[in-house]
Amino acid sequence: MEEKQIVYTLEGTGTRETNLKNEATNLLAKLKNQFGSTHSVTAGEFGVLDKDWSHEIKIRKGDKVGAAVTLKWAKSNPTVLSIDVDESSKMGSRILYGGLFSFMGIGAYMGYNHIEPFAFLPGQKIATALAALIMAIPGIIVVYILKSMLMKNEKEENKQLVASVINVCKK
């Protein structure tokens, strides 16, 4: 299995915030240079530098193929910038959130209104929370099956994209 985490050592004479912005901007430029013509490369806001800081860059090709590069920095180790690369597709996120939240919502409704099989749960608030939690289990199973069925053709392309992104980040 390929390594999905890269560790950079921050160097430079500027402030930490300037060094982190420079690293994020340089990485974004590298990724746009490599994938800009065939993929959509977007970055989130830089954010405020606190105890922990993270920044995400997404590389996408349509709805089913994509990768996310997450830059992480912690104040406890100020000279180290960690970069994680993972698969990230719009369709996968939609399936996950739509399927999981639907099942949890149905469970919460059934628990709140004491509908069988959740009628035995005590109270309304506790019953709502527990029923939603119980219904998350079949929701996760359904999401896993749907993702494996709907995205099986793009699995290899996603792996290649992640490997390419890792190679660009290592340079």
Image (spheres, helix red, strand yellow):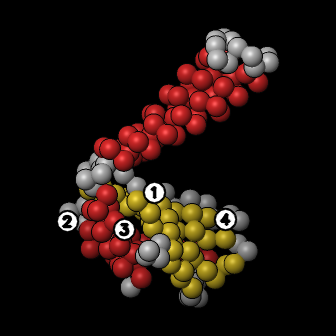
Residue 69: image tag: none
Identity, as a three-letter code, of the amino acid under mark 2:
Ser
Q: Does residue 31 appear to the left or right of 107 in the view shown?
A: left
Q: CA distance from mark 4 to mark 1?
A: 16 Å
| SS assignment at label 1 | loop
Using the image, determine if residue 109 lies above or below residue 17.
above
Q: Which residue is mark 4?
A: 52
| SS assignment at label 4 | strand
Of pointers 4 and 2, the one earlier in the residue sequence:
2
Q: Which residue is mark 1?
A: 44
Q: Quadrant of the C terminus?
A: bottom left
Q: Does residue 138 appear to the left or right of 42 in the view shown?
A: right
Q: Residue at x 39, y 75 (%)?
A: 166
Dot 2 crowding, Cα within 10 Å, few <14, some 14–19, many 20+: few
Dot 3 crowding, Cα within 10 Å, few <14, some 14–19, many 20+: many
Where residue 168 appears, x then y in whole percent? 35, 78
Q: Residue at x 69, y 22 (%)?
A: 128
User: Tags 4 and 3 in contact by the CB under 8 Å rule?
Assistant: no
Q: Which residue is mark 3?
A: 162
Where residue 127 appears, x then y in whole percent? 73, 21
User: Tags 3 and 1 in contact by the CB under 8 Å rule?
Assistant: no
Of pointers 3 and 1, the one earlier in the residue sequence:
1
Dot 4 crowding, Cα within 10 Å, few <14, some 14–19, many 20+: few
